[in-house]
Image: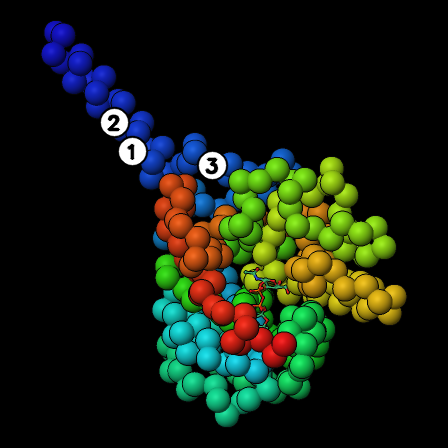
Amino acid sequence: NVKQSCFLLFLAMFSTFLFHYFISRTDVVSVTPWLAPIVWEGTFNPTLLDAVYYKKNISIAATVFAVGKYVMFLRNFLETLDQHFFAGFRVHVYVFTDQPKEVPKVKMAAGRELIVQPVPSSNRWQEISARRMEIIQKLIEEKIQNKVDYIFCLDVDSKFHDRWGTESLGGLVAVIHPGYYKNDRSKFPYERRTSSRAYVAPDEGDFYYCGGAFGGLIPEVLQLAKTCRKNFEDDAKEGIEAAWQEESHLNRYMWINKPSKVLSPEYLWQDFKQREAEIRTIRFSGVVKNYNDIRPN
Ligand code: UD2
């Protein structure tokens, strides 16, 4: 009868809505043209993914730099990392700092460790950001190559709010910058001088990616760090510093070497930005900071 048909129709529509809302996403692009997943809340099953990776007994390294006044961000970063970053997995957190004594003694969950590595201070903030690639390269080559499976390199002036886990794993992983994901690529702040090795032409580029979070399998990140470091240093020899330092070189690298997994801006939001409808959760975000107070110059 009519009542029954209407009810069945309603049921079918409602379950389609539920499926689309909770399991798949139709409001955002969730695959790149080179068929890499773009990870958004609602595009993956965390329980299933965790079960797959538990069996592989993986371990993950995270690197973070806290030079000069940036040590003030460490406590919040480390405490929230322990709660949300690969919870239940083996994690090695490497803190690079010029003030090892100031690193807060945050107690990590079982199977997770905090390793403090001294680095020199610097008078130029650009140099601190730029030297990260060299230090990441050395860390991989000298310490973790045969010990760890994946690595993520993260900005310290940030904190975790929600799960960042196995859904983010891939060969080469980049995060879409929250400031530019709605812009046309001609508007991305790539390095536009042809004299720089970070140059990207106006009709090139896929996404604008963050310098504040990237990662992947150890050999892939080693290759990225080596290339970006060399290009940065070769530019410097010619007196060129790319517009956004290593972020510009990273963007050039990702244009040539497409990431095998792309993380949505849920994986690096900015606290000063109003949350948009498609951002169903914020997993990690940059805190509001006053550059004049915290940078050396
Ligand atoms: C953007 C990028 C950042 C980097 C930079 C380029 C994001 C969210 N941020 O951020 O990753 O590519 O542009 O220059 O993608 N640091 C210190 N001490 C200092 C200065 C910097 O330890 O005095 C470290 C610290 O880990 C910090 C990171 O370098 O998180 C990036 O520096 P920033 O926060 O000043 O760069 P920002 O926010 O302009």
Residue located beneath label 1 in the image: 18
Q: Nearer the viewer, residue 115 or 99?
A: 99
**Dot 2 lies on which element?**
helix
Residue occupying image coordinates x 40% and y 36%: 24
Pointer 3: residues within 10 angstroms few (<14), some, or many (20+)? Answer: few
Q: Give the residue type that dot 1 points to.
A: Leu
Residue 56 position in % (x across, y down): 50, 62
Q: Quadrant of the C terminus?
A: bottom right
The image's colouring method is rainbow
Residue located beneath label 2 in the image: 14
Q: CA distance from mark 2 to mark 1?
A: 6 Å
Q: Counting residues from the N terminus, which is met first, the one under dot 3 or under dot 1?
A: 1
Name the residue furthest right. 238
Residue occupying image coordinates x 71% and y 47%: 255
- Rendered-image quarter of ligand 1: bottom right
- In-image side of 203 versus 7 (left or right): right
Q: Nearer the viewer, residue 94 or 157?
A: 157
Res 129 quadrant in image: bottom right
Residue 37 visible, this orientation: no
Per the rendering, the mark at residue 28 is: 3
